[in-house]
Image: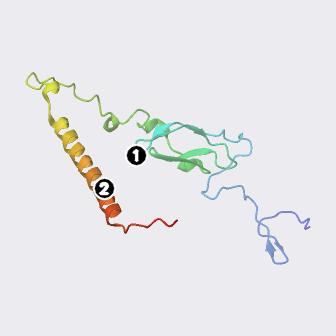
Amino acid sequence: VCRAQEKAGQQLGSFVVLSGGNHSSLGEQLDPSEPPPTPDFCRGYFDVMGQWDPPFNCSSGEFIFCCGTCGFRFCCKFKKTRLDQSTCTNYETPLWMNTGKPPSRIDDPLHDPTRDKTNLIVYIICGVVAVMVLVGIFTKLGLEKAHRPQREHMS
């Protein structure tokens, strides 16, 4: 362990001691007298697909600022990239998702559902086809049984 005094530019063997290294990677000055910033709260919002993303706290280690865009939010390290959530307008259901009520059904006085024979015709055709298939199957079974050679009973 080196116990040399930290003076700017002082060389210790092959090491150079630098002072004033209390800056973040984006050049933000951290004031030691200032309390650490409190974690941000990312508000819930509707994303670009219209899905609701619930609110969340940015309190995971260094990632304490709510960053990103109004449609995609995440926690980040640097205050400079913080999202100003007050400028976002996607907190209410998007208008394009409001499909509204279906149009009310207007009863046609000329249309009488009791006189509609469309379904009846379909049922009749399906019934006739089913009966024909059954007749064909039983006819084939009967013909096969009739053409089998007779077995003689042995006593």
| Image color mode | rainbow
Rendering coords of residue 26 (x, y %): 60, 57
Say if mark 2 contacts mark 1, CB within 8 Å.
no
Is the N terminus in the top left, top right, bottom left or bottom right quadrant? bottom right
Rendering coords of residue 71 (x, y %): 44, 45
Q: Is disc 2 placed on a helix, strand or loop?
A: helix
Q: Is residue 29 left or right of residue 16?
A: left
- What amino acid does circle 1 point to? Met
Which residue is tagged 1? 49
**Camera-side residue: 33 or 64?**
64
Which residue is tagged 2? 137
The crowd level at tag 1 (other Cα within 10 Å; few <14, some 14-19, many 20+) is few
- What amino acid does circle 2 point to? Ile
Rendering coords of residue 48 (x, y %): 40, 46
Q: In this view, does 101 lie to the left or right of 152?
A: left
Q: Nearer the viewer, mark 2 or mark 1?
A: 2
Q: Is disc 1 placed on a helix, strand or loop?
A: loop
- The picture quadrant where one finds residue 23 is bottom right
Per the model, the C-alpha gap separating discs 2 and 1 is: 56 Å
Q: Residue drawn at (37%, 69%), measured in percent from left and top?
A: 149
**Camera-side residue: 7 or 15?**
15
Q: Residue drawn at (53%, 36%), measured in percent from left and top?
A: 43
Q: Is residue 36 visible to us here?
A: yes
